[in-house]
Image (tube, grey):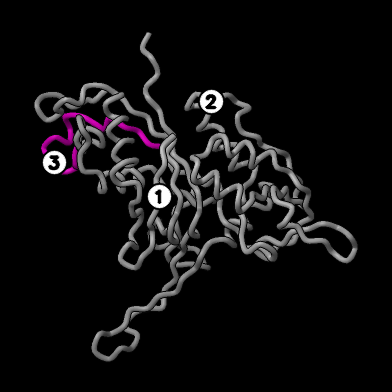
Amino acid sequence: MSSNPPTYILFLRALTPLHVGAGRGASVHVELPVQRDEFGFPTIWASSLKGALRANFDRGSKCDKNTIFGPEPASPEASEYSSATSFTDARLILIPGRLLKGVWAYITSPHMLEQFRTLLEVRGEKADVLSVPSVSDNEALVSKPELILTGSDGKRYIVINETRLETREDKSVVESLSKVLPDKIASMVKDKGVIVVSDTVARDIVNRSMVIQYRVRLDPNTKTVEQGPWSEEYMPSNTVMASLVVCREPRRRGSGGGACASATDVCNDLVGYFTNTRSTIYVGGKETIGKGLVELYFR
């Protein structure tokens, strides 16, 4: 019986607002929306993620770009072999939310945590490694008491993205997240705090966290508006997402494959390159205006 293929979780933390576009949208509130999953949450489709990694990968010690990511679609090799790596869509785990007290904290929900826990289980973690609490629609679970307000009636509450919710302190989520997140992200999560809201409330909270930017194109001679305005949607800085990466034995044969002979070689070169050589890349199409810079972490 063959052993399971090498598997990693790839974490992405947005260093600047992030726009990975879905094309021109039919939405009434924004013309250029970000990609979203089947539940309406912001995501990065696997094809977009893989394309960004491919564009930023040079060469590993044993495996080259075509062996790891597959041949270019229009190349003569396109029908001869496929990629030695598989990626899942990068799902939302944590997104910053504005607070009335404390500036911002990380927001998540049972649904987002369950999706993350599924990746951990595929990776080989135990089912109980990540705490997924129950939370009602009118409350929020807060990991830091410093973020909680007290009303004139003595009730404790929190205001997230202009939404007021009753609250109770619960550190179970941030403590379990700190065990499964990369150290740098875990440190930020502890420092900023985690707020868990119900799945019913989460979509509205997440949508209110999105950044909508209006842009115009100027005529270079008259400096007047030539085109626009149009609106673009961005995930905020410090958004955290996760994707599953599976490596397999290279399908490329002959001299082109070089010394890349195993799934372990593939993962070692992919993870090693983006950990030691280029851990920060641009994802999406707005890099010329300083958007889409993300930091990569593998676990």
Residue 111 place in picture, x, y as percent? 61, 41
Among the two numbered marks 2 and 3 on one chain, the one whose residue lies closer to the N terminus: 3
The residue to which callout 3 is attached is: 75
- Which residue is rendered at x = 73% and y = 43% of the image? 170
Horizontal side of 39 relative to 141 (left or right) equals: left
Residue 52 place in picture, x, y as percent? 31, 48
What residue type is disc 2 on?
Answer: Glu
Query: Which secondary structure, mark 3?
Result: loop
Q: Nearer the viewer, residue 40 or 220?
A: 220
What residue type is disc 3 on?
Answer: Ser
The residue to which callout 2 is attached is: 125
The residue to which callout 1 is attached is: 295
Residue span colored magenta: 71-87
For the stretch drawn in magenta, the main secondary structure is loop
Quadrant of the image containing the N terminus: top left
Q: Are the two marked residues, 3 and 1, in contact with CB atoms closer than 8 angstroms?
A: no
Q: Is residue 227 above or below residue 125?
A: below
Q: Nearer the viewer, residue 207 or 124?
A: 124
What residue type is disc 1 on?
Answer: Glu
Residue 253 place in picture, x, y as percent? 15, 24
Quadrant of the image containing the C terminus: top left
Q: Nearer the viewer, residue 229 or 180?
A: 180
Query: Which secondary structure, mark 2?
Result: loop
Image depth: mark 2 or mark 3 in front? 2
**Quadrant housing residue 153:** bottom right
Between the residue at mark 3 and the residue at mark 1, the CA separation in whole angstroms equals 31 Å
Horizontal side of 198 relative to 263 (left or right) equals: right
Numbered label attached to residue 35: none
Query: Which secondary structure, mark 1?
Result: strand
